[in-house]
Amino acid sequence: MVDSLLASSTYRLRKKLYSAHAQHTRRKRSVGVTSVFWSAGQTLRISFLNGTCPWHKQTIVATACHWLRYANLHFKLVNDGDSQAEIRIRTDVAEDINYSVLGNQSLNETDESMAIGAKLSDPRFEAIVLHEFGHALGMDHEHQHPHANIPWDLAALRPLLREILAKEVDDQEALDDAIEDELATQFLPVPDDGTRLLLPYDRQSIMHYQVRQTHTVGNWKARRNQVISEKDKRFMRLVYPHPCQLRC
């Protein structure tokens, strides 16, 4: 089975390296400047950017609506190709490509803010949609929690990513920089610097990727979770409270 985290990383690396604006300097994740959260009670418009069939679109949106049981937000499916929509989704990508921009950072994107390559027949489809919409509502990867203490084997991960892309890229220095950026922004812990809402580390979170033992040092691994955890629910209630919660 394809490793989801590596597959998404490879896709992002290709986009960075093939972009006309690709730079040779390492780009750090921007944190703490502006909150990535939407406003409680806000309606987020969802638009698809390719010819996704109506049933596929409705299934994605219906699955994403599971978050609305805990978050005071609303979703509205609008016309395809609506550049003003807060969440803009592509589905015409490879089946192992699934990712989302974090929260309102989607407003800074000029094309899609989310990609869902998973097919309806994939047994992980619902979990994947929930995970990506968790990002769209502002949740970081749980495996990057500063208290997760995952002993990533970077010496093993670097050549894995390099092997996939080395023959496609002429500028090997740019590839090395892009890999280091990807490891920093998608694998390693986010800083515990007071700029994030941090609840206790939750190994059961829908935002926790599978961690393969071959990618870590020692006997550390984690499975890919399938449902929204109690901690995930609490996070949404804190970030997007309902009016009755604010009065209590």
Image (tube, rainbow, N blue to C red):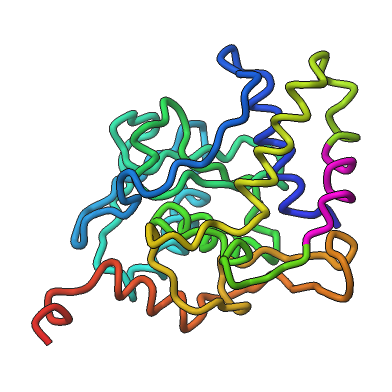
Tell me where residue 90 appears, x and y as whole percent: 53, 37
Asked if residue 17 lies left or right of residue 75, the reply is: right
Magenta-colored stretch includes residue 156 = yes
Q: Report the predominant secondary structure element of the magenta stretch.
A: helix
Count of picture labels: 0
Task: In the displayed orientation, state which residue is furthest to the left.
Answer: 247
Tell me where residue 195 appears, x and y as whole percent: 38, 57
Asked if residue 94 lies left or right of residue 165, the reply is: left
Can residue 20 be seen in this snapshot? yes
Q: Which residues are magenta?
A: 152-161
> Image height check: is 151 above or below 116?
below
Res 223 → quadrant = bottom right
Magenta-colored stretch includes residue 58 = no
Task: In the displayed orientation, state which residue is furthest to the bottom.
Answer: 248
Q: Residue at x 68, y 22 (%)?
A: 17
The N terminus lies in which quarter of the figure? bottom right
Task: In the displayed orientation, state which residue is furthest to the front.
Answer: 193
Q: Residue at x 71, y 29 (%)?
A: 177
> Image height check: is 17 above or below 59?
above
Residue closer to the observer: 80 or 212: 212
Q: Residue at x 44, y 76 (%)?
A: 199
Residue closer to the observer: 53 or 237: 237
Q: Residue at x 59, y 72 (%)?
A: 147
> Image height check: is 148 above or below 110?
below
